[in-house]
Image (tube, coloured by chain):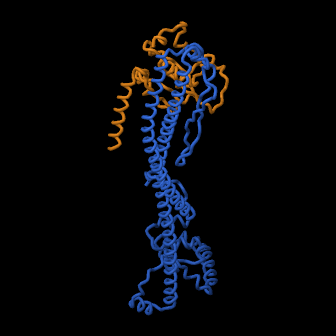
Chain colours: A blue, B orange
């Protein structure tokens, strides 16, 4: 699952809750953004319609203005000051204003006209009235032009906003929410896995304890039986429980005889040593092995005594394996 | 129209627009937006009468265009206007817009807004084009 797109978090219960909350928040946010996007689209369509109407109006006004200036020319109006003199300062200009629509900040223009006429000397010699008319018509036309340009400006900004919102919605829908959901499922899976692991461990330890208990009860029951009783017991069939594979040191239970056995082992070790030294010269290997096998008849699963007589244990282990005579010889040396 | 094509005072109609941006401009209020004009004499005249033209030491925001004005000059002036941050609207007239149409297609900035105005000579063609566009938009709206 390395290709699955998810966040890297530690799978814990706290994180699971956090992820769930994040998914909820993301879904809510996406709903809101979708509504915003729809609202922006509605507004855009409205703007376009408004612009269409405005355009016609602007055209009409411009036509009027142009006719007015043509008429003024026809009447020989004196426009020389306009051509000759350059205007130093533009008295009429625009101001940029801010408007908020559908939660989007939009700018638009507002025309600011000064009281003082530009080129006041125009038309002084001839056609002053015409000049005023031209001014009036052009001013009106300009106002509408500015309004139309504002609409266009707002339209552009809204398209950008719509595009942005759409991208955000898509991002949430196809990237962020799937990622969060994947993380959430991953965390749930991991938590379940931990639970299962704990459960398994618990069960296994319980099983082992049960095994140990059963083996112990069995041992207690069969410990003091004679051979016949043992055979009977075996024939009856042991209860169908699994045998513990744990090694039980049954000699530990015979605490009373423990010290006796310790003493015996000690004595035996020392006697063995002296015997060995004596017999070294005399005996040959076969007889040696025979004596050895006869001498010590102890439980292979020896007790604490075996730790004291390590040599004894080695000796005992060699008992079943009587082919390796060379090693015995080396031992005696 | 002769009063306008003959220049009585021999003053060139197209001012020298090849100056660089002057860095000696008085800083204006940042909220003030200007209007740029590239149009023929009459329309530009009318608009100037309203008072939207201005000029500084080395820059003026209007250009009167004739039939014989070179395309290069117009283009250069247009680029100057377009780049200036305090110009919000550029008014072009119809024949100039047609001449500059490849340049206009490359304009993708948010500001300035380019508005096309008719001229006396081109009114008929202008209205026809507008009708065509309107019908096209209506057809698209239905789809």
| Residue at horizontal 55 percent and vertical 58 percent from the top | A10
Q: In this view, does B53 lie to the left or right of A33?
A: right
* Nearer to the camera, B90 or A213: B90
**Is residue B70 positioned above or below B28 on the image?**
above
Quarter of the image where the N terminus of chain B is located: top left
| Residue at horizontal 49 percent and vertical 42 percent from the top | A158
* Nearer to the camera, A166 or A180: A166
Q: In this view, does A257 lie to the left or right of A212?
A: right
Q: Residue A251: give x, y in percent of width and height.
A: 56, 82
* Nearer to the camera, A293 or B95: B95
Q: In this view, does B102 lie to the left or right of B10?
A: left
* Nearer to the camera, A237 or B32: B32
Q: Is residue A112 left or right of residue B71?
A: right
Quarter of the image where the C terminus of chain B is located: top left
Q: How many labels does the image show?
A: 0
Tell me the quarter of the picture where residue A322 sits: bottom left
């Amino acid at each position: 699952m390395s290709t699955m797109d998810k966040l890297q978090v530690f799978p814990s219960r706290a994180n699971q809750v956090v992820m769930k909350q994040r998914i909820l928040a993301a879904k809510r946010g996406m709903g809101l953004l979708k509504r915003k996007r729809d609202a922006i689209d509605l507004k855009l369509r409205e703007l376009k319609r408004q612009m269409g109407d405005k355009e016609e109006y602007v055209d009409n006004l411009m036509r009027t203005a142009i006719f007015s200036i043509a008429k003024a020319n026809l009447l020989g109006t004196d426009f020389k000051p306009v051509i000759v003199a350059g205007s130093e300062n533009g008295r009429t200009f625009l101001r940029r204003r801010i408007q908020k629509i559908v939660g989007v900040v939009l700018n638009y223009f507002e025309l600011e006209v000064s009281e003082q006429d530009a080129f006041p000397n125009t038309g002084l010699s001839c056609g002053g009235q015409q000049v005023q008319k031209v001014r009036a018509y052009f001013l009106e036309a300009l106002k509408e032009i500015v309004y139309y340009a504002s609409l266009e400006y707002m339209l552009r900004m809204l398209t950008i906003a719509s595009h942005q919102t759409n991208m955000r919605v898509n991002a949430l829908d196809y990237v962020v929410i799937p990622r969060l959901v994947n993380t959430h499922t991953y965390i749930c899976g991991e938590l379940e896995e931990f639970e299962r692991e704990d459960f398994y461990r618990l069960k296994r330890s319980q099983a082992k304890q049960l095994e140990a208990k059963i083996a112990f009860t069995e041992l207690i029951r069969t410990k003091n039986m004679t051979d016949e009783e043992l055979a009977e017991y075996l024939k009856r069939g042991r209860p169908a429980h699994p045998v513990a594979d744990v090694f039980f040191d049954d000699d530990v239970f015979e605490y009373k005889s423990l010290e006796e056995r310790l003493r015996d082992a000690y004595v035996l070790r020392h006697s063995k040593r002296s015997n060995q030294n004596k017999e070294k010269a005399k005996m040959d290997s076969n007889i040696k092995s025979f004596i050895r096998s006869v001498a010590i008849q102890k439980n292979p699963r020896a007790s604490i005594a075996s730790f004291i007589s390590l040599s004894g244990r080695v000796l005992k282990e060699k008992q079943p394996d009587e082919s390796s005579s060379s090693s015995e010889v080396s031992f005696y040396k | 129209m002769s009063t306008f094509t003959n220049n009585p005072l021999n003053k060139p109609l197209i001012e020298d627009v090849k100056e660089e941006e002057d860095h000696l401009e008085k800083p204006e209020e940042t909220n003030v937006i200007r209007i740029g004009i590239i149009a023929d004499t009459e329309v530009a005249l009318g608009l100037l009468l309203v008072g939207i033209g201005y000029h500084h030491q080395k820059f003026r925001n209007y250009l009167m265009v004739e039939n014989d004005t070179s395309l290069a000059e117009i283009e250069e002036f247009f680029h100057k206007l377009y780049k200036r941050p305090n110009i919000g609207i550029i008014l072009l007239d119809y024949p100039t817009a047609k001449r500059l149409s490849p340049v206009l297609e490359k304009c993708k900035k948010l500001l300035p807004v380019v508005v096309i105005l008719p001229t006396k000579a081109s009114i008929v063609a202008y209205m026809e084009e507008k009708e065509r566009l309107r019908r096209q938009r209506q057809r698209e709206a239905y789809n």
